[in-house]
């Protein structure tokens, strides 16, 4: 029983990892497998889905998978295997991934972090990933941008800008950033200029 518990937990983790990979259309795999080489190394691979391989359950070497799939596999594996409550930092975590996979990766990251109580920090410049964020995740976004003095950078929480509703109306955070609208809100005098414009508009109505 003592040995069965950890084995069952490991099997469940593998199933959750495989479930994410199975959602990638060009990677029709049924499960994750392992094989020992003649040198004594253990290689990871995937058991091909019988529907796509006509019943052939051979192990496919993970090294032939696309870079994006391998990167997603590595990130999901890290999220599933670090100790519960860990802090994880992933730089440019969506690098190499097709934009259509953004929603899948965001969903897997959010669900796993919540279930395992992980504190995850990821960086990105990818508008597709930003657009995949839902409104509840916007307040957790930190923006790294140049300081108005020209020296160094500063970090601003997106929620502090009070623009979540505006972003939602305009097609998502990625679109908001791509059009340069976020730069306007980060300008040091933006709030004052907007207030002045509002006062002038109200005055024009009287």
Image (spheres, rainbow, N blue to C red):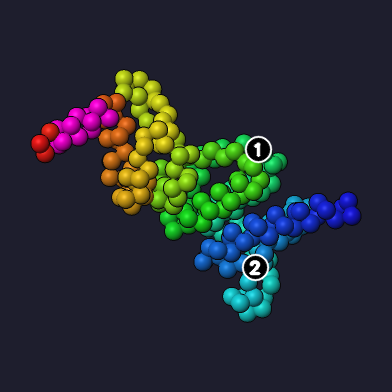
Mark nearer the N terminus (1 vs 2): 2
User: Any magenta on residue 151?
Assistant: no
Residue shown at 69%/57% (left/top)? 14
Instruction: Determine whether the residue tagged by mark 2 lies in a helix, strand or loop.
Output: strand
Residue shown at 79%/57% (left/top)? 8
Q: Distance between the residues labelled 1 and 2?
A: 29 Å
Q: Name the residue under label 2.
A: 30
Q: Name the main secondary structure of what is drawn in magenta.
A: helix
**Left or right: where 110 falls relative to 153:** right
**42 or 204: which is nearer to us?**
204
Residue shown at 39%/25% (left/top)? 153
Q: Name the residue under label 1.
A: 86
Asked which quadrant contains residue 147, the reply is: top left
Residue that protrudes farthest toward the front in the picture: 206
**Left or right: where 122 falls relative to 147:** right
**Left or right: where 47 falls relative to 28:** right
In the rendered view, would you say 160 is above or below 74?
above
Instruction: Determine whether the residue tagged by mark 1 lies in a helix, strand or loop.
Output: loop
Q: Give the range drawn in magenta.
A: 191-202
């Amino acid at each position: 029983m003592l040995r069965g518990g950890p084995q069952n937990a490991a099997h469940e983790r593998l199933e959750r990892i495989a479930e994410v990979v199975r959602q990638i259309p060009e990677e029709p795999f049924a499960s994750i497998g392992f094989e020992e080489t003649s040198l004594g190394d253990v290689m990871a691979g995937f058991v091909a889905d019988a529907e796509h391989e006509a019943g052939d359950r051979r192990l496919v070497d993970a090294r032939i998978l696309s870079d994006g799939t391998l990167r997603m596999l590595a990130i999901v594996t890290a999220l599933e295997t670090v100790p519960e409550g860990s802090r994880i930092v992933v730089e440019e975590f969506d690098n190499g991934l097709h934009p259509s996979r953004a929603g899948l990766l965001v969903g897997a990251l959010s669900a796993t972090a919540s279930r395992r109580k992980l504190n995850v920090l990821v960086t990105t410049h990818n508008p597709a990933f930003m657009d995949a964020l839902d409104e509840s995740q916007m307040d957790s976004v930190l923006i790294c941008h140049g300081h108005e003095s020209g020296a160094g950078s500063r970090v601003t929480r997106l929620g502090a800008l009070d623009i979540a509703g505006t972003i939602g109306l305009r097609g998502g955070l990625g679109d908001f950033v791509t059009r340069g609208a976020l730069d306007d809100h980060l300008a040091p005098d933006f709030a004052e200029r907007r207030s002045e414009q509002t006062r002038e508009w109200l005055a024009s109505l009287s």
